[in-house]
Image (cartoon, rainbow, N blue to C red):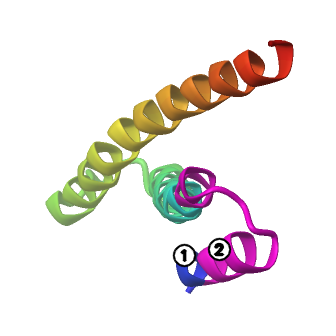
């Protein structure tokens, strides 16, 4: 739901560049994955704290590893795109 709203609001109403709208939309999706990973880790920590003798189930480990595999490359992509966008904006402003 967030990604179409980002394109509608930032792209249409605020008339941002397509690259900037795509970056914001990517951040929306990444925020959802980050929130899900954070909630999963909190639930694991709560279960471990309440019942320290039990081990983790394989489905929980698969979920955390899947979220992490999605989150880390997306973070690298967003960081590199932010750096590229910042340098391009600085080049335009300071010329």
Magenta-drawn segment: 5-24
Q: Based on the picture, tell me whether residue 22 belongs to the magenta stretch.
A: yes
**Do the residues bearing badges 2 and 1 touch, measured as CB atoms within 8 Å?**
yes
Residue 63 vs residue 8, the one in the foreground: 8
Task: Please identify the quadrant where the C terminus is shown.
Answer: top right
Q: Residues within 10 Å of mark 2 (few under 14, many from 20)?
A: some
Q: Position of residue 17 (x, y in %)?
A: 64, 56
Q: Nearer the viewer, residue 42 or 48?
A: 42
Residue 3 badge: 1
The residue located at (42%, 30%) in the rendering is 76
* Magenta segment, prevailing SS (helix, strand or loop): helix
Q: Is residue 60 magenta?
A: no
- Residue 35 picture quarter: bottom right
Who is closer to the viewer here, 19 or 23? Answer: 19
Report, in whole angstroms, how far the alpha carbon at label 2 lies from the one at label 1: 5 Å
* Residue that numbered label 2 is attached to: 6
In the image, residue 9 lies at what x, y percent?
Answer: 74, 78
Vertical placement of residue 7 versus 30, above or below: below
């Amino acid at each position: 739901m967030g990604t179409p709203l980002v394109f509608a609001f930032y792209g249409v109403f605020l008339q941002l560049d397509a690259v900037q709208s795509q970056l914001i939309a990517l951040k929306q999706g990444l925020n959802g994955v980050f929130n899900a990973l954070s909630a999963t880790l909190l639930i694991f920590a709560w279960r471990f704290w309440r019942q320290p003798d039990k081990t983790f189930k394989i489905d929980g480990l698969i979920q955390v590893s899947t979220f992490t595999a999605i989150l880390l490359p997306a973070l690298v992509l967003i960081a590199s795109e932010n750096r590229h966008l910042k340098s391009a904006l600085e080049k335009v402003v300071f010329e």
